[in-house]
Image (spheres, grey):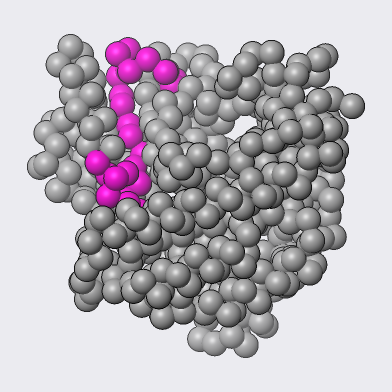
Amino acid sequence: MSADKVIEEKKQGQALLTENKEGNHKKLFIESYGCSMNLNDSEIVAAILADQGYNTTHLLEEADLVLVNTCSIREKAEQTVRKRLEKYNAVKKINPTMKVGVLGCMAERLKAKFLEEEKIVDLVVGPDSYRDLPNLLEEVEAGRDAVNVILSKEETYGDVSPVRLNSNGVSAFVSITRGCDNMCTFCVVPFTRGRERSRDPKSIVEEIKQLVDNNYKEITLLGQNVDSYLWYGGGLKKDFKNASEIAQATAVDFSHLLDLVAAEFPKTRFRFSTSNPQDMSLDVIYTMAKHENICKYIHLPVQSGSTAVLQRMNRQHTREEYMELVDNIRRILPDCSISQDMMTGFCGETEEEHQETLSLIEYVKYDFGFMFAYSERPGTAAEKKMVDDIPLEVKKRRLAEIILLQQKYSLYNTQKFVGKTVEVLIEGSSKKSDAHWKGRNSQNATVVFPKGDEQIGDFVNIYIEDCTSATLLGKRI
């Protein structure tokens, strides 16, 4: 995996397009930045607005309504959104009736301030307020400010059937939790997405069934922290006075949910993201081992290899506990791939602590990762109580060292597939060649091979002949 690839945003901004709904005449242009949850949220927004007469378009210039679904996790993501608003402003000068709205985490963080800072913005809507979009659009039409960023303790959008935007018709996201209760000192998510709450498993199964009936072959279960999924009839986990009260309730935890959907839909592949090391149980790993259709891949963010840094980050695990979890994964799922999120240059990070991060990468030998330098986020505990004291040049040097080491192990892991046959789900044509298909194996490695009579959505067995650090190259057998 190239250095510029591993340090980019997990998902770049995407203008999303879907089928037209008969009778709709207004045009919606929606872009998403940040995590997969934002992409899924945009699908929910499109579904809500489809009932208000909007069809989506990929042409910004013809849009009646432009929405940007934002991310606040890093400063770079917010800067990208500001630049996109400049582009929207240029179009709005040509099409002055066009309305512009900001959705998501950045909207939640800045709230009404957005209307003051960005004169082009007509409405600001937080992640728990998308049902209010029809009312907010009426406010805009009446010439009034339209802001709703109220966080909810119950909202899961479980009854909204998302419109599958920019879909390959093969893979889809299904959200199972919203919000986060883990107060990492560097992170804005608890403030922008609110408290953790889980979705009714019946609604999850119903949504998956709709996707399967429409020939989707792979489902990714989504949440800020999927391993903390817990359904006992609704409400927040913290509404219980103690753990015994939770235990006495009829509860479905993540391992139960995973077992349920894998058994119910045996011909469908399942993935999940994101896991939190402190919450991942052995039951989840054993459930993965039990079902062939649960992909053998875990994204396991760690952020640092130093226990001292993890403590400053308020991560609820140590280096040793993380390593023990990895050991258990390797023992129960020997063929499982593991990826990471790694932050360098956090407040007070010493050279010794940086070396501990490098040694953790050496220990785990991650298949790939998302690596970045710490950037201070307003409103977090780190911003309020700590000093961002690592010089930029030191952050860049440490990040380069992390990336270089990860490249080594990315290649190490792809080379292990050479000479082996893997099952691949075809997702579409290769970006570099229309004569080749691309897809992923169970371990989430991208596989490219020459086209034959296969179709998108087919499962095929591919013999791997060669590889790069990011891609497996093979042929149909």
Residue 44 can be seen in this image: no
Most foreground residue, 42 or 320? 320
Q: Quadrant of residue 230?
A: bottom right
Indicate whether 71 appears above or below 391: above
Q: Quadrant of residue 330?
A: bottom right
For the N terminus, the image quarter is top right
Residue at 69%, 49% in the rendered image? 413
Indicate whether 1 appears above or below 184: above
Position of 284 with respect to 144 (left or right) is: right
Q: Quadrant of residue 212?
A: top right
Q: Is residue 93 magenta?
A: no
Residue 455 can be seen in this image: yes
Q: Is residue 56 magenta?
A: yes
For the C terminus, the image quarter is top right
The spot of residue 261 in percent (x, y) is 76, 52
Most foreground residue, 391 or 442? 391
Position of 295 with respect to 300 (left or right) is: right
The residue range painted magenta reads 54-79
The spot of residue 448 in percent (x, y) is 70, 27
Residue at 76%, 47% in the rendered image? 416
Residue at 21%, 51% in the rendered image? 110
Indicate whether 115 appears above or below 74: above
Indicate whether 427 appears above or below 94: below
Most foreground residue, 215 or 86? 86
The spot of residue 216 in percent (x, y) is 71, 32
Residue at 52%, 28% in the rendered image? 165
> How many circles with numbers are drawn on the protein?
0
Q: Residue furthest right?
A: 477
The spot of residue 326 in percent (x, y) is 66, 69
